[in-house]
Image: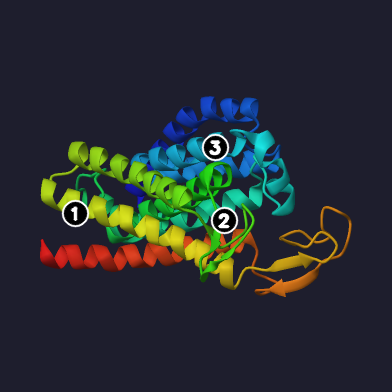
Amino acid sequence: MSEIIIYLISSLFWGICVNLPLLFLIMWKKYLTIPKGVIIGAITAILCFIISPILWVCVLCFFLSSSFLSKWKQSEKHEVNLEFAKSSQRDSVQVISNSFPAIFFGILYLIFENFPRIILGEEISLGIQSHFLFAAFTTIATHTADTWMTEIGIIYGKNPRLLINLKKKVNPGTSGGVTIEGTIAGMIGAAIISFVYVVSSLFTTSISPLKILLLSILLCISGIIGGGIDSLEGATIQRIYYCKQCKKESETNPHKCGNIPYFLRGYSFVTNDFVNLSSAFLSGIIAIVCYSFVEILI
């Protein structure tokens, strides 16, 4: 048990050291709300580093790229942000909904796979030879794909369509709306996380390159599927209002015009944060199943 405590204290120390400079950058760039967003973000980053430095790198790639895209061409997205309660600055609830699935699967990895190795005195591998850690990576790929789909789709997407009814045109930023440009961007976002997985695996594990390649492809696909699940939930179960005065769908109540919109579809408790959380969990479960098949085949 003392070995685990030593391991956790050491990881905590280095986690604080590497995250402290980033914390100042995040506050300077105003990527998170102060103080709650920054506090929760710092705790999240340190936990991810303790779970796996490689997972921490992936979370960092997601957070920095997504924050940049959220602020990029912000003036052009102003009306959409007002309509659908989007913001370039993430609050504590958004941080939790985006990070909790990865931390959940990561903690399972620590408890059932990493800690037993420490107790037995075995070498701790940074390589991703774990169902649970693979699932954690997939949840980050899901959030990256979803954010890239949304941000790029709003700016460059043409003729957004509702995922469950592609004949129906919707306004940019509508939950469940999809565009070709946004979908391609989501694929690129998931591929970036997959690339980090490939590079880290090549340098930190002894498993065959074929297996690494196959798992990286599955990671990318699972992330894209997770982004698709997010859009599907946004089109079906997420709460959406309709303002009769403006004749627009919205996620805000009251509407930006001041009117009280009527409830159009979905469930009242299903917010965008709930959708982010649940889609990531589902993609993580899919990843575990995929990993199991790869273990059987190779």
Q: Amino acid at mark 1?
A: Leu
x and y, in percent, of residue 270 in the image:
64, 69
Q: Which residue is mark 3?
A: 69
Q: Quadrant of the C terminus?
A: bottom left
Q: Nearer the viewer, mark 1 or mark 2?
A: 1
Q: Which residue is mark 1?
A: 214
The quarter of the displayed image where residue 215 is located: bottom left
Disc 1 from disc 3: Cα separation:
29 Å
Label whose residue precedes the other's in the sequence (3 or 2): 3
Q: How would you rate the neighbour count of disc 2 (Cα within 10 Å): few for under 14, some for 14-19, many for 20 or more?
A: some
Secondary element at tag 1? helix
Q: Nearer the viewer, mark 3 or mark 2?
A: 3
Label whose residue precedes the other's in the sequence (1 or 3): 3
User: Is residue 104 at all visible to an observer of this figure?
Assistant: no
The foreground one among 70 and 135 is 70
- Please state if 63 lies on the left or on the right of 119 as rendered: right
Q: Which mark is residue 97?
A: 2
**Residue at position x 55%, y 43% in the image:** 43
**Residue at position x 24%, y 38% in the image:** 199
Q: Amino acid at mark 2?
A: Ser
Disc 3 from disc 2: Cα separation:
19 Å
